[in-house]
Image (spheres, rainbow, N blue to C red):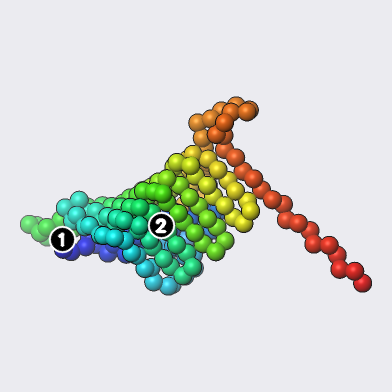
């Protein structure tokens, strides 16, 4: 068995980084090519799963069974991580086609992304390299401290940092609308002199 180029490990790190939710969970200015699971870290990405299947003819690597990617203090967990690469032209005539750059990453849930500051949960997540977008779907919950944002679909443009939380529910009083609960910072009482 041989792995598609680039190796599955860096691609999984890009998926994890893609799931760093723009401003919601600390996406930096770096684009997806420089993305990491733990922002600003040069630590290695450690990926584990119950099994890894590589289908070279489809430029696909599938990490199945409690898949987990760790870097520093950041963690991505999903039931299945699928990493797809674009097919590359052979270097010479008659050579076997190879796999090129990262094309698409899919995480099947439940999907969890956790850092020391933020937590995000969804049923599924997809990163599209061409559009530089992450779409998290199914009971999406993003939390930072006590602040919580809920919806059914979260779309993030990682190039611009723009994010949009959506649901199908419409109108005042409708069940299942986008909901945020935010706690203002509590002012500390002035010290008595």
User: Which residue is more in the foreground, 77 or 87?
Assistant: 77
Say if mark 1 contacts mark 2, CB within 8 Å. no
Residue 111: percent from left, percent from top: 42, 51
Name the residue located 41 percent from the left edge and 49 percent from the top edge: 110
Where is the N terminus found, in terms of image quarters? bottom left
Residue 179 position within the rendered picture, expressed as x and y whole percent measured from the top left: 60, 40
Residue 47 pos. (x, y %):
34, 65
Q: Which residue occupies the extreme right position in the image?
A: 193
The residue that disc 1 covers is 91
Relative to 111, residue 34 above or below: below
Q: Is residue 172 visible?
A: yes
Q: Is residue 129 visible?
A: no
131 with respect to 97 (left or right):
right
Q: Which residue is mark 2?
A: 77
Q: Residues within 10 Å of mark 1 (few under 14, many from 20)?
A: few
Task: Give the quarter of the image for residue 85.
Answer: bottom left
Furthest-left residue in this view: 94
For the point 49% across and 59% down, the residue is 114
Disc 1, SS: loop
101 w.r.t. 139: above or below: below
For marks 1 and 2, the one nearer the N-term is 2
Q: What residue appears at the point 76 percent right and 56 percent down from the top-left corner? A: 186
Decide: few, some or many residues near mark 2? Use Cα within 10 Å; few <14, some 14-19, many ≥20: many
- The span from disc 1 to disc 2 (Cα, nearest Å) is 36 Å
């Amino acid at each position: 068995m041989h792995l598609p180029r680039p190796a599955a490990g860096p691609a999984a790190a890009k998926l994890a980084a893609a799931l760093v939710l723009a401003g919601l969970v600390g996406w930096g200015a770096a684009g997806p090519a420089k993305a990491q699971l733990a922002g600003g870290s040069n630590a290695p990405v450690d990926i584990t799963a119950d099994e890894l299947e590589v289908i070279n003819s489809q430029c696909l690597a599938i990490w199945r069974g409690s898949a987990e990617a760790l870097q520093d203090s950041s963690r991505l967990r999903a039931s299945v991580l699928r990493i797809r690469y674009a097919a590359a032209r052979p270097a010479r005539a008659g050579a076997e086609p190879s796999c090129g750059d990262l094309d698409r990453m899919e995480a099947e849930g439940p999907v969890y992304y956790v850092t020391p500051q933020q937590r995000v949960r969804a049923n599924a997540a997809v990163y599209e390299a061409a559009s530089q977008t992450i779409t998290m779907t199914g009971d999406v919950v993003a939390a930072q401290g006590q602040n919580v944002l809920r919806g059914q679909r979260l779309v993030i443009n990682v190039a611009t940092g723009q994010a949009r939380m959506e649901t199908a529910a419409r109108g005042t009083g409708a069940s299942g609308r986008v909901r945020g609960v935010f706690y203002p910072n509590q002012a500390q009482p002035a010290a008595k002199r």
